[in-house]
Amino acid sequence: MAADTSSRLFRNAPGPDEMSAKDDMVWRLESGRRARPIIVVVIIFDDDLPWEAFTTWHESLCSMMPRLRSRVAPGRGPRGRPYWVPDEGFSLAHHLQRVEVNGKGTRRDVFDTAELLAEIPFPQGRSPWNGYLISGLEGSKSAYLLKISHSVADGIRLREIFLQQAAAATASPASSRAAATDPWQVISPMPETGSNTPQAPPPPSSSPRGRRLTKAVRFLGRATADMLDLPRPVPPAGGQFLRRFHTTTVPLAPVKHLATASGGTVHDALVAAVMEGCRRYNARHGVQRRNIRVFSPYGRPPRASAHSPQRQGNHWFIVRFAVPSTLPGIQDRIRAVRRAVHDSYDRDAADWMGVMARLCPLLPRRLFEAVFLRLCATHDFVVSNMPGPATAASIGGHPVGEVFAIAPTLGSAVTVTLMSYRNTCHITVNIDSTVIPDPDLAAEHICRSIEELVGQASAIGAVPRD
């Protein structure tokens, strides 16, 4: 059966697919030892997912994303970008594995297992992804871990595949056929939801080119100064790849109402809470920083009218901004974050990470990695927010209980990712333990600050009555 599946997928494979500049950049960084731009997704099921349903789901997933069944070929010429070519020897058996969870099968045990699996490098000559069916969870549950190279797709693209397939399943009257062909099946209809991405204001009357040039000069000045004032050390050269994953969950409604009452978004509230957690951790170590610097990917450039229709590759737009660290109240912090985002994410914002991606092939790999990591290390944390469906989903008819996304730390020592699902915020804190010696303490402060959002919403009357 595996051979038949591989042959069918290969026959339907497209031709060569050249990487974009951003794809090429993360691919080059992945070959180093310090950045490792790998995305991890952990799904915890309400029951035990059979192996047959697991493999069938991946057949559908691979048919939608050709890069999952392709390998990377070197670029043509010294400056040519790598490209994806169909892998004639592709087999799901090379990418899917069964593993037993460590410990007693708690959520903590699942993420301890995920930490170990994330350290394993991808085999050369194959598409850089692996799927693990994790058994042995308490309550006769199972879990799924997807580990995938950032060069295949960014987190926004992976999230959009989830939403598109969920919507397709609800639109199809033949639910049984949809369950067999769509990787995600929605159990109940999913209402349309708006993105938390802020809308860019209309451009002022002055020259757009002049405004962009002014912003670019300001950005270079700030970035240069920030590289001389790092909140933490740059990840050590030649060190181990060690990450510590922590999770927490909070209801979405009070966070959303708190954000709205403060003139911000869910993303702003998340940033404000993580800022407070970092401030508390710094205070424990006798460190006081005037500003907290934030690195945040958005799904599209501010001048774009819609998300890219492509299901693969990297199409993000990076926003970096600083917020005063000593603001006393949660609403003050949310408002300050909103102002900072508004100033950074507008129609004249420069795609500075896109510029770095285009410069990447022109520099020696080690030099580019060192510059990239030092720039990323100027940020106190990286934060991502990916809104998901409000209704229950399933894989192969087996209900999904929780969904956690884990973005890479890159040069920053802390990355926080929020994935909303069924009106719950599933939050993962990813910490580089080669930089932060007490990652559990750092995560404890960050998670506690996020959990306090619910009480803070209630305190200001921002939670609607039943």
Image (cartoon, grey):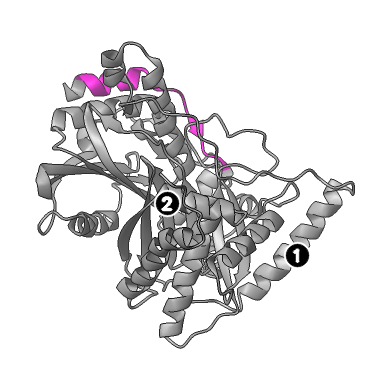
* Residue 49 place in picture, x, y as percent: 16, 35
The kind of residue on which mark 2 rests is Leu
Task: Estimate how packed mark 1 is, as few (under 14), some (14 to 19) or many (20 or more) residues with alpha carbons within 10 Å.
Answer: few
Position of 322 with respect to 14 (left or right) is: right
| Vertical order, 138 against 279 (above or below) | above
Residue 433 or 70: which is nearer the viewer? Answer: 433
Residue 125, quarter of the rendered image: top left
Image quadrant holding the C terminus, namely: top left
**Residue at 30%, 48% in the rendered image:** 122
Q: Is residue 220 magenta?
A: no
* Residue 449 place in picture, x, y as percent: 42, 67
The kind of residue on which mark 1 rests is Arg
Question: Between marks 2 and 1, how big is the CA–CA gap?
Answer: 30 Å
Q: Which secondary structure lies at badge 1?
A: helix
| Vertical order, 184 against 328 (above or below) | above
Position of 220 with respect to 466 (left or right) is: right
**Residue at 15%, 28% in the rendered image:** 52
Residue 174, quarter of the rendered image: top left
Image quadrant holding the N terminus, namely: top left
* Residue 139 place in picture, x, y as percent: 11, 46
Position of 88 with respect to 328 (left or right) is: left
- Label placed on residue 218: 1
Residue 3 or 225: which is nearer the viewer? Answer: 225
**Residue at 14%, 43% in the rendered image:** 141
Position of 401 with respect to 437 (left or right) is: left
Residue 234 seen in render: no
Extreme-bottom residue of the structure: 286
> Circle 2 is placed at which residue position?
418
Q: Which residues are magenta?
A: 4-20
